[in-house]
Image (tube, rainbow, N blue to C red):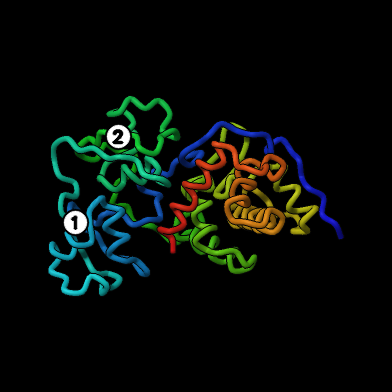
């Protein structure tokens, strides 16, 4: 059966965006936050280089601070001292590809609201690569950096399980699925965009109808977390199938396959760069 291509409202080009449609607070982030001032607890699958990058330091500095003779040997549950973490006084941070204001706030033990206020940012969803942010000292509400992650379906842990299961079901790289979900919503089912996209994968209702009918996925409910992930991953797989490359598929997921031309538009390139930067962190 030949599949019809959905050309709904969500396929129109949208303004360039450099972060998730709706940011997660530090309390709902899946990436581990410092367990206490100046410390970090290693999670399964993490590397010292990834932890160093996340905290704006280097492998050499971390290894020296923690008396590690072999930087390649760290274990889950191990507590690392992070030199300079949560230090007092004025700090600054230069935004890198794939970063969101929520991740940056969590890294420094503060909140999205506090960072936005310190930098006079009216829209926390809009930060750009290369932007230099002033990081205020202290917490400032909006979710503590040490908040525990529960195992409920709506929690980051529950979303992670759903993302991994649906990635395996549809044969899509798990790291890519997680990166798209983080870029779109910060892994929050409660996320809603101003154009009507819903949930973890920021699925438009029209896209959900297309995946349910034309792609044969039944009657999935875009407002239910696991169904939302199922819809988004199925649509991403469809983009990979019809557009042929990861970069073009991501552009198609973001703005619709009808808007993916010979060369990607600037706003599409920005989205693709951010997702690919995030993918490397989830591997």
Residue at the spot 24% in from the left edge and 36% down from the top edge? 135
Could you tell me which residue is drawn at 25 percent across and 33 percent down?
134
Question: Is 268 situated left or right of 52 in this image?
Answer: right
In the visual, does 144 lie left or right of 240? Answer: left
Query: Can residue 149 be seen in this snapshot?
Result: yes
Which image quarter is the N terminus in?
bottom right
At horizontal 48% and vertical 42% (from top left) the residue drawn is: 20
Whether the residues at callouts 2 and 1 have beta carbons within 8 Å, the answer is no
Q: Nearer the viewer, residue 281 or 206?
A: 281
Q: Which residue is mark 1?
A: 82
Q: Which of pointers 2 and 1 indicates the residue nearer the eye?
A: 2
Q: What quarter of the picture does the C terminus occupy? A: bottom left
Question: What distance separates the C-alpha of mark 2 from that of mark 1?
Answer: 22 Å
Image quarter of residue 148 = bottom left
Q: Looking at the image, which residue is at 68% across and 53% down?
A: 243
Q: Position of residue 209 (x, y in %)?
A: 75, 47
Q: In this figure, which residue is indicated by the disc labeled 2?
A: 132
- The residue lying furthest to the right in this view is 1
Secondary structure under the numbered disc 2 in the rendered image: strand
């Amino acid at each position: 059966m030949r599949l019809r291509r959905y050309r709904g409202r969500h396929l129109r080009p949208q303004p360039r965006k450099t972060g998730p449609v709706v940011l997660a607070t530090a309390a709902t982030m899946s990436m581990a936050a410092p367990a206490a001032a100046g410390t970090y607890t290693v999670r399964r699958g993490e590397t010292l280089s990834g932890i160093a990058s996340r905290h704006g330091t280097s492998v050499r500095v971390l290894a020296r601070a923690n008396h590690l003779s072999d930087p390649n040997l760290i274990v889950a549950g191990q507590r690392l001292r992070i030199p300079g973490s949560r230090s007092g006084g004025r700090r600054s941070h230069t935004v890198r590809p794939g970063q969101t204001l929520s991740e940056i706030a969590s890294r420094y033990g503060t909140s999205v609201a506090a960072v936005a206020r310190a930098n006079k940012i009216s829209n926390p969803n809009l930060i750009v690569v290369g932007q230099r942010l002033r990081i205020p000292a202290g917490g400032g509400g909006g979710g503590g950096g040490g908040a525990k992650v529960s195992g409920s379906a709506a929690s980051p842990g529950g979303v992670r399980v759903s993302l991994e299961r649906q990635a395996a079901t549809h044969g899509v790289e798990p790291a890519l699925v997680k990166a798209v979900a983080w870029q779109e919503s910060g892994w929050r089912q409660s996320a809603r965009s101003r154009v009507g996209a819903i949930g973890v994968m920021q699925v438009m209702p029209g896209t959900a109808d297309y995946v349910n009918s034309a792609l044969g996925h039944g009657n999935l409910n875009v407002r239910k977390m696991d169904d939302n992930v199922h819809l988004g991953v199925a649509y991403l797989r469809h983009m990979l199938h019809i557009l042929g490359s990861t970069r073009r598929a991501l552009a198609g997921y973001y703005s619709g396959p009808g808007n993916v031309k010979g060369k990607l538009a600037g706003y599409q390139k920005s989205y693709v760069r951010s997702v690919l930067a995030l993918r490397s962190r989830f591997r």
